Image: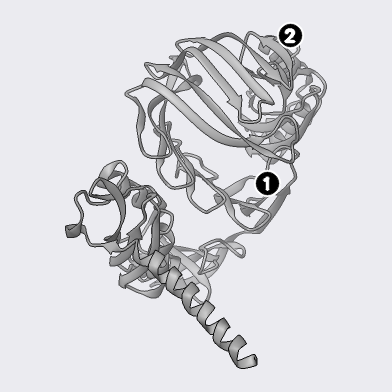
């Protein structure tokens, strides 16, 4: 009896395995020369090259070695456009190989091969190139940046200054104090300045709670690069304390770049979590006398498959994103928004609706100017004249500046020293008009910075909250406060 049971089990296993391999055999992997139409990236090779240029992050120790060359990667383009079974065909060095694998495993935007008019699986290979980089020096756990006359130097032997920074060699993130030392013949000497490694926790009700890491000056201002991490350790944002030194970059949870803002050219480039281009925008100045007054114009836009929707500012946009349901905040639902762009700005009727029907809106635009709209949330409809309304000080800007003039006391030490300038602060205007999350963005002098924060805190409860489609929302607000001596 037991023998019959074993034979029966083995026969069942054999038949099941045979069926499995038979089903797998029905989906062979073809070579490019065996298909009628080869697999190709959606958007063509320029799209794939742009993807690699943006998302490939050369490992820190590879930058130290200034490693250059190609990693040849192979994979299989599946019938749904995914890239599977990604492997190294020819490597460069282990850390570069792993980075090439990481990036290519996210490149799931292929148009599948066709054979006999049907999608088929096809093998592909592609070279991932690591370019030469600026000199990066590393010794005893520290990144070393050498300078000659305050200019980054490629020759440590001629440098007169070195910046020493402890880093994590896997992530490239700082792990300790930033030190500036004198240098002679490539050897660090006397320490002339030290900026402590700082971690700032930020709790938020409507966004990810985060930790900012970087270095601060004695007056409390950040210096160098600032990194914002989610609580799970994933990177959310990188920015320079001097915003003009490098672009500000935001990241999706999967590590892919979500948005890059070039603070010099005022250009924005957004990406889907797959790595495909989503949108390009350019800042347009509305007031020639004030470069801060303006708006972003949409130049190009694509959908998640790489199909271009907007060209040179004109086209019909359709966007999909997952949002919290208005019926149950614990659940996610798909929000679909669509409308036309004319010369880079929203124009005509724009509509949005969630898949579960809990939220919908309709608005009318004239060259980017909202003429009004209505939103329905769980059956209740609200009308509004502005889609997005900024928070406002009671009485408007004129009253706000009058309040500042009446309440600012020029610090005596700064007055005696003739210190002047603009202090930039930020705060959040809550839904009830109260203020919170006060931060010093850019300081001038310790006492001026303190006075700017003090007087801004006195503005609490004197603001009208911002709103989105008729509903009050929390809005972060930045304010320059000028200290001028007659």
Q: Position of residue 95 (x, y in %)?
A: 42, 71
Residue 227 in percent (x, y) is at 58, 51
Seen in the picture, residue 98 relative to 9 is either above or below; the reply is: above
Residue 13 appears in the picture as rendered: yes
Per the model, the C-alpha gap separating discs 1 and 2 is: 32 Å
Residue 84 coordinates in the image, percent (x, y): 40, 61
Disc number lying in front (1 or 2): 2
Quarter occupied by residue 7: bottom right
Residue 263 screen position, x and y as percent = 45, 36
Question: Which numbered tag is attached to residue 385?
Answer: none
Q: Which residue was labeled with disc 2?
A: 395
Q: Is residue 69 above or below residue 429?
A: below
Q: Is 163 situated left or right of 326 in this image?
A: left
Q: Residue at x 43, y 54 (%)?
A: 106
For label 2, the SS is loop
Residue highlighted by disc 1:
220
Residue at point 65% right, 19% down?
A: 390
Q: Nearer the viewer, residue 14 or 82?
A: 14
- Quadrant location of residue 92? bottom left
Kindly state the secondary structure of the residue where label 1 is placed: loop
Report the quarter where the N terminus lies: bottom right
Mark 2 crowd level (few <14, some 14–19, many ≥20, 10 Å Cα): few
Q: Is residue 234 left or right of residue 247?
A: right
Residues at marks 1 and 2 touching, judged by CB atoms closer than 8 Å: no
């Amino acid at each position: 009896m037991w023998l019959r049971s074993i034979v029966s089990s083995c026969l069942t296993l054999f038949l099941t395995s045979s069926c499995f391999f038979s089903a797998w055999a029905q989906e062979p992997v073809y070579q490019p020369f065996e298909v009628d139409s080869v697999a190709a990236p959606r958007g063509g090779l320029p799209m794939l090259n742009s993807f690699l240029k943006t998302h490939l992050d050369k490992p820190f120790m590879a930058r130290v070695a200034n490693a250059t060359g190609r990693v040849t990667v192979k994979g299989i383009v599946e019938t749904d456009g995914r890239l599977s079974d990604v492997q190294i065909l020819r490597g460069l060095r282990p850390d570069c190989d792993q980075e090439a694998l990481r990036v290519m495993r996210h490149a799931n935007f292929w148009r599948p091969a066709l054979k006999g008019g049907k999608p088929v699986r096809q093998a592909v290979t592609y070279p991932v190139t690591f370019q030469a980089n600026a000199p990066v020096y590393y010794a005893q756990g520290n990144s070393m940046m050498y300078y000659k006359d305050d200019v980054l130097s490629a020759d440590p032997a001629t440098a007169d200054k070195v910046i020493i920074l402890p880093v994590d060699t896997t992530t490239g993130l700082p792990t300790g104090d930033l030190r500036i030392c004198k240098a002679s013949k490539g050897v660090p000497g006397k320490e002339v300045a030290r900026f402590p490694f700082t971690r700032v926790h930020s709790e938020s009700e409507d966004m990810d709670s985060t930790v900012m890491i970087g270095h601060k000056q004695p007056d409390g201002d950040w210096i160098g690069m600032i990194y914002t991490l989610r609580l799970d350790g994933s990177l959310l944002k990188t920015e320079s304390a001097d915003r003009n030194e490098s672009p500000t970059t935001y990241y999706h949870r999967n590590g892919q770049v979500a948005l890059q803002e070039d603070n010099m050219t005022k250009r924005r480039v957004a990406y889907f979590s797959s790595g495909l281009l989503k949108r390009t925008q350019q800042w347009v100045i509305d007031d020639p006398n004030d470069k801060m007054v303006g708006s972003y114009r949409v130049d190009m836009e694509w959908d998640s498959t790489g199909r271009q929707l907007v060209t040179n500012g004109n086209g019909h946009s359709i966007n999909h994103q997952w949002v919290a349901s208005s019926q149950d905040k614990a659940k996610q639902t798909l929000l679909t928004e669509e409308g036309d762009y004319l010369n880079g700005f929203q124009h005509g009727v724009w509509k949005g609706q969630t898949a579960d029907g809990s939220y919908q809106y309709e608005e009318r635009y004239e060259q980017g100017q909202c003429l009004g709209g209505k939103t329905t949330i769980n059956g209740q409809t609200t009308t509004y004249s502005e889609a997005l309304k900024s928070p406002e000080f009671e009485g408007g800007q004129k009253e706000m500046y009058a309040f500042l003039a009446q309440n600012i006391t020029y610090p005596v030490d700064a007055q005696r020293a003739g210190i002047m300038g603009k202090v930039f602060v930020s705060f959040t205007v809550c839904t009830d008009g109260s203020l919170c999350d006060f931060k010093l963005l850019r300081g001038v002098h310790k006492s001026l910075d303190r006075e700017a924060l003090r007087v801004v805190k006195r503005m609490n409860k004197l603001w009208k909250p911002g709103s989105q489609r008729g509903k009050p929302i929390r809005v972060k607000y930045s304010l320059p406060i000028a200290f001028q001596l007659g």
